[in-house]
Image (cartoon, grey):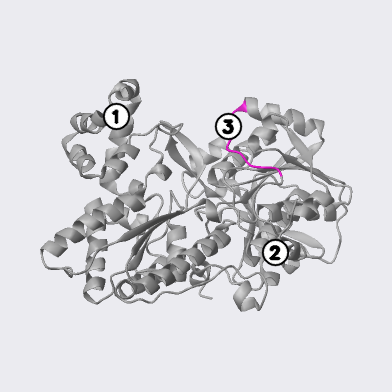
Amino acid sequence: MTKSALQIARAAYEPKVPKTLKGYVRVKEGEPTQSVSDPDEIKKLFPNTYGMSVIRFEESDTKTAYNPVNVGVILSGGQAPGGHNVIAGIFDGIKDIHPESRLFGFILGPGGLVNHEYMELTSDIIDEYRNTGGFDIIGSGRTKLETEEQFDKGLEILKKLNISALVIIGGDDSNTNACVLAEYYARINAGVQVIGCPKTIDGDLKNEMIEASFGFDTACKVYSEVIGNIQRDCNSARKYWHFIKLMGRSASHIALECALQVQPNICIISEEIEAKNQSLDDIVNYIADVVAKRATAGNNFGTVLIPEGLIEFIPAMKTLMAELNDYLALNDEEFKRIKRSAQREHIIDKLSPENSRIYKSLPETVARQLTLDRDPHGNVQVSLIETEKLLAEMVANRVEELKNKGKYPQKDKFSTQVHFFGYEGRCAAPSNYDADYCYSLGYTAAGLIGSGKTGYMSSVRNTTAPASEWIAGGVPITMMMNMERRHGEMKPVIQKALVKLDGAPFKEFASKRDTWAVTTDYVYPGPIQYFGPTEVCDQPTKTLQIEQKK
């Protein structure tokens, strides 16, 4: 493998960790916990792993003797910067437990466990991947661990390799599955611990005990750099409005964090749109009004940040998509036989009057995207909907109306550029924050294994302080769970964290967005800095700093 100069230099970086992980450690148990909601139902489903206490690791004067332990690790779901450092932290942590401990990686995600595809991760392999982006050390996958047949099949290879603990590195769905697996193995006395690690660049796996999902910091810094570059170009050419869609289907954390970093003219927050019951027209009118105000002031350019999942948060669009899903589920074959040029009119005729009106108002390309093949659950594939193009086109039409009314300078032309930043941020070399945080999460997971815990998620908190002061420990996964309807049935799942409209980060944004809209107050963060003074290299996200008032 050919290495870049950055890879070679980063290989020597030693992640900063909480001081409690550096020496002898003891476990401090907290009070018993209960689930964030639906405690009776969750307790009934998880009798062996419910109600456990939050724990934290503290410094100790005495060393505990441990036997060697064999551990398995799985990377589950989409990639996020820092995954390799989680694995490195697990490796170093179990080697500290006992030098003869061994780590096995299951290939291409949970499917590797079920299909018995694995490799041993030795020190020479681990050293090749320290402080690097991506999940390519063992690959990732989206197979869901849901059935007892899968659990039993996985147990076969775990027993064969004498693995007594399994770490699942993933998002809310993957950690929900980890909790189910931990409960099952506890119920049948399988002798296998299951520990989770919080991963997702979307930032929607967070709560009072999980300050951030790993990868969020790096991804937002990557996107903010590129948005900053676009804003500088925008301010130089002074002739384009840039509509920029950002990752985040279920929550707007990335859009909000990037807005706090770069100070765009407009940033849409999906959760606010839903809370205010706003329509697509409301959003278009808001953007067009800002465009007109800036043009009148001589600034015929600007930037608009759009969360990926916006379309699903617009109440009227959500109702439209639900009716489309139901119609196509029952009439898919018939619909596909209709001539492509006639499909739009066919849908307009079949929908209820209000949904028909909304569908008819959409640009042709977006209307077609709403009728493309569904995902495995029968839903619209939101990531394929080009919301940035939808808004750019609809705002252009509205600006033309404003021009005809004399509310937009006649001499000016409204020109747009559209962008979608997604995969660009998922495998970047982790920032110092993520390199440190991920390594600490992995090392903490090893500590949870050594302490005999199962059904826990690795937790590292107080991360706006210097790394030596971070608090390492574990939180029962059942504590984060509630019951939600999935595929027509009520299922236990980890509650997604949406942007809180009464939270400090959103309030900070809301207090400044009207000023950013009409002024050109762009910030240009530049690329991630891996070397240099700590105030440049080690800063956590603006979101965390505002939440913790740092």
Marks 2 and 3, how far apart at CA: 40 Å
Q: What type is the residue that disc 1 sits on?
A: Arg
Q: What type is the residue that disc 2 sits on?
A: Leu
Residues at discs 1 and 3 in contact (Cβ within 8 Å): no
Q: Position of residue 514 (x, y in %)?
A: 30, 72
Q: What type is the residue that disc 3 sits on?
A: Glu
Residue 215 lies in quadrant: bottom right
Q: Which label was assigned to residue 63? A: none
Name which residue lies at 50% across and 69% down.
Answer: 542
Name the residue tied to disc 1: 340
Name the residue tied to disc 3: 146
Q: Is residue 145 magenta?
A: yes
Q: Residues within 10 Å of mark 1 (few under 14, many from 20)?
A: few
Q: Is residue 93 magenta?
A: no
Q: Earlier in the sequence, mark 1 or mark 2?
A: 2
Residue range corresponding to the magenta coloring: 138-148
- 468 vs 26: above or below: below
Marks 1 and 3, how far apart at CA: 39 Å
Name the residue tied to disc 2: 6
Q: Position of residue 263 (x, y in %)?
A: 41, 71
